[in-house]
Image: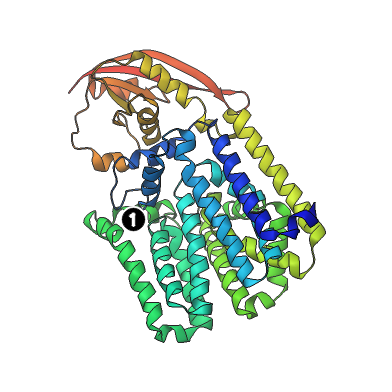
Amino acid sequence: MNNFLYKNPKQSAYSIILLLAFFSTLYNSFIPLHGDEAYYWMWSYHLQSGYYDHPPMIAYLIYLTNFISESEWGVRLVNVFSFSIAALYIFKLTSDMFDEQTALNAVIIFSSVILVHAGYIITTPDSPLILFWTLSLYYSYKALFYGKWSHYILAGFMLGFMMISKYTSILLITSILFFILLRKRDILFNIKFYTAVFIAIIVVLPMLLWNYQHDWISFNFQLDHGSSNTYEISLSSAIEYIGGQFVVFSPLFAALLFFFLVKDKLYFKENKLFFLVLATLVTLLFFLYKSLFKPMALNYAAPAYVSAVILLAYIISKHQLQKSFKIGLIIAIVLTLIGRFGILFYLEIFQDRMYGNKEAVALVQKYSRQGDAFYGDHLTTAALLQYYLPGHPESDLATGSRFSQYDMWRENKYLKDGLVLTRDPEETSLKQKYKDVELLETLEVKKGINGTKTFYIYRVKTAF
C-alpha cells in the first residue's frame, strides 16, 4: 500500500484531497447548521466591507456558494473549498522546499487530524483564514526565496485577503516580518517588497474605512473578546490550551513536532526551516501567552498547523520516523472517526448547540401567520429562524443578547407582532416590551448523555 501511494506522490495527494472534499460535501448534507453558521450565512444577504464580529471575507465566500446551493452542504462548500485548496498548496510548498514524498506526508497529516476535519464541517471565519493563510505562506515564501515580481504581487493580494478573513492574520504577518528582519533585511530595500505591501493595504482599505466610520467597533470587540480584564494568571487555562494541542493535532504528532523543535537547533539555523518555525511558533506562543489570563478556544491557534504539518513531514523524513508516523496516523484517524461518527449519530452529545434547532424552527413555522415578524432570544437563534423558515424572512432579537450585527442594522427600536423562539423561559422580559405574551408550545429535546433542553415559542402582540 505504501509503495502504491508513493509511486506517484502528486497523484496520491490530489486523490486524497478530492476524496476528502467529496466525502465532506456528502457528510455535511446530513448535519444541521450551527447557529454561528446561520449568522454568517445571514451576512451574505447584507454584503458590506466590515461586520461587528469579524472582517467580511466569510460573507463574500458564502455569497458565492449561495449560487450553487443554500442548503447545509452548500453553506459548507466554503469549508470544502478552503481546506481543499489549502491542502493543495501545502503539497506545492512542501514539494518546493523538500520533495514530493515529504509533501505527500504533509497532505496525509493535514487530512487526518481532527482539527482539520472540524474545519471541513463548521463554517466560520477560520475557513477563509486557513485558505488565505496557506496561500500567503506559499507566495511569501516564493517571494522571499525566489524574488520574482509575480510572487510579490500575488503575496500582496493573498496577505490582503487573509487580513479581511480574520484579525488573527496579523500573526502570520508578524512572523514574516520577524523573518525579514532576522534573515532577509536586504528585502527592505527592494521595491518589490513595498509593492506587495501597497497591494495588501489597498485590499484591506475598505475594511479599515468601515471600522473607522464605526469608531473601530469591530477591532475593539475582538480585543475585548480575546483578552482578560485582569492580569491574574490562570495556570489551569494554560494547561487546558497546551493539552488541547495534543488532542486537535493528534497526541503523537504534537509530541514529535514539539520534541524535535526543541531538540534540533537546525530548524532555527536553516532559512527555509526557520521560515516555517516562525509561522508555527509565533501563533502557538501568542495564544499560549493569552491562555495564561483567559481560556482560549482550540480553533484560535489552528493556522499554526499549516506550517506545522510541513515541519512534521520533514521531521519524519529527516529522522526516518516511519513507524512513529504510522502510529501517529492511526491515532489521528481514530480520533477523527470518533468525532465524525459522534457528530453524525450523537449530535446531542458531541455538539448539543446544533441539536434540535431545526425542529424548533419547524414548530415556529406551524404557528406562523401572514405578516408575522420573527424573533429569537440570541443572535444564533434569530439567524437560525431566518435560515430554516421558508423564504428566509428577516429576523431580529426580542430579548437581551450580547451586542451583535443585529444591533447595528436595527433601525426601529419598536418590535412588531409575531413569534419569538427562545431557549429559556422569557415571558417576564417579553412582557416588558409587549402587552400580550402567549406561550404557544414548548419543545423538549436531548442534551448531552442524559440531559434535556427546552425551546419556548411565544406569540407577542401590540408593542409599546
288 or 43: which is nearer to us? 43
Q: Is residue 64 visible?
A: yes
Would you name the residue on which mark 1 appears?
A: 220
Indicate the secondary structure of the residue bearing disc 1.
Answer: helix
Residue drawn 39% across the image and 39% down it: 66
Q: Is residue 261 left or right of residue 286?
A: right
Image: 238 above or below 443? below
Q: Position of residue 278 (x, y in %)?
A: 56, 70
Q: Position of residue 435 (x, y in %)?
A: 22, 17
Quadrant containing the C terminus in the rendered view: top left
Residue 169, image quadrant: bottom left
Q: Is residue 12 left or right of residue 232?
A: right
Image: 180 above or below 211? below
Residue drawn 64% across the image and 50% down it: 15
Q: Is residue 147 left or right of residue 278?
A: left
**Label 1 crowding class (10 Å Cα cut-off): few <14, some 14-19, many 20+?**
few
Residue 230, image quadrant: bottom left
199 or 235: which is nearer to us? 199
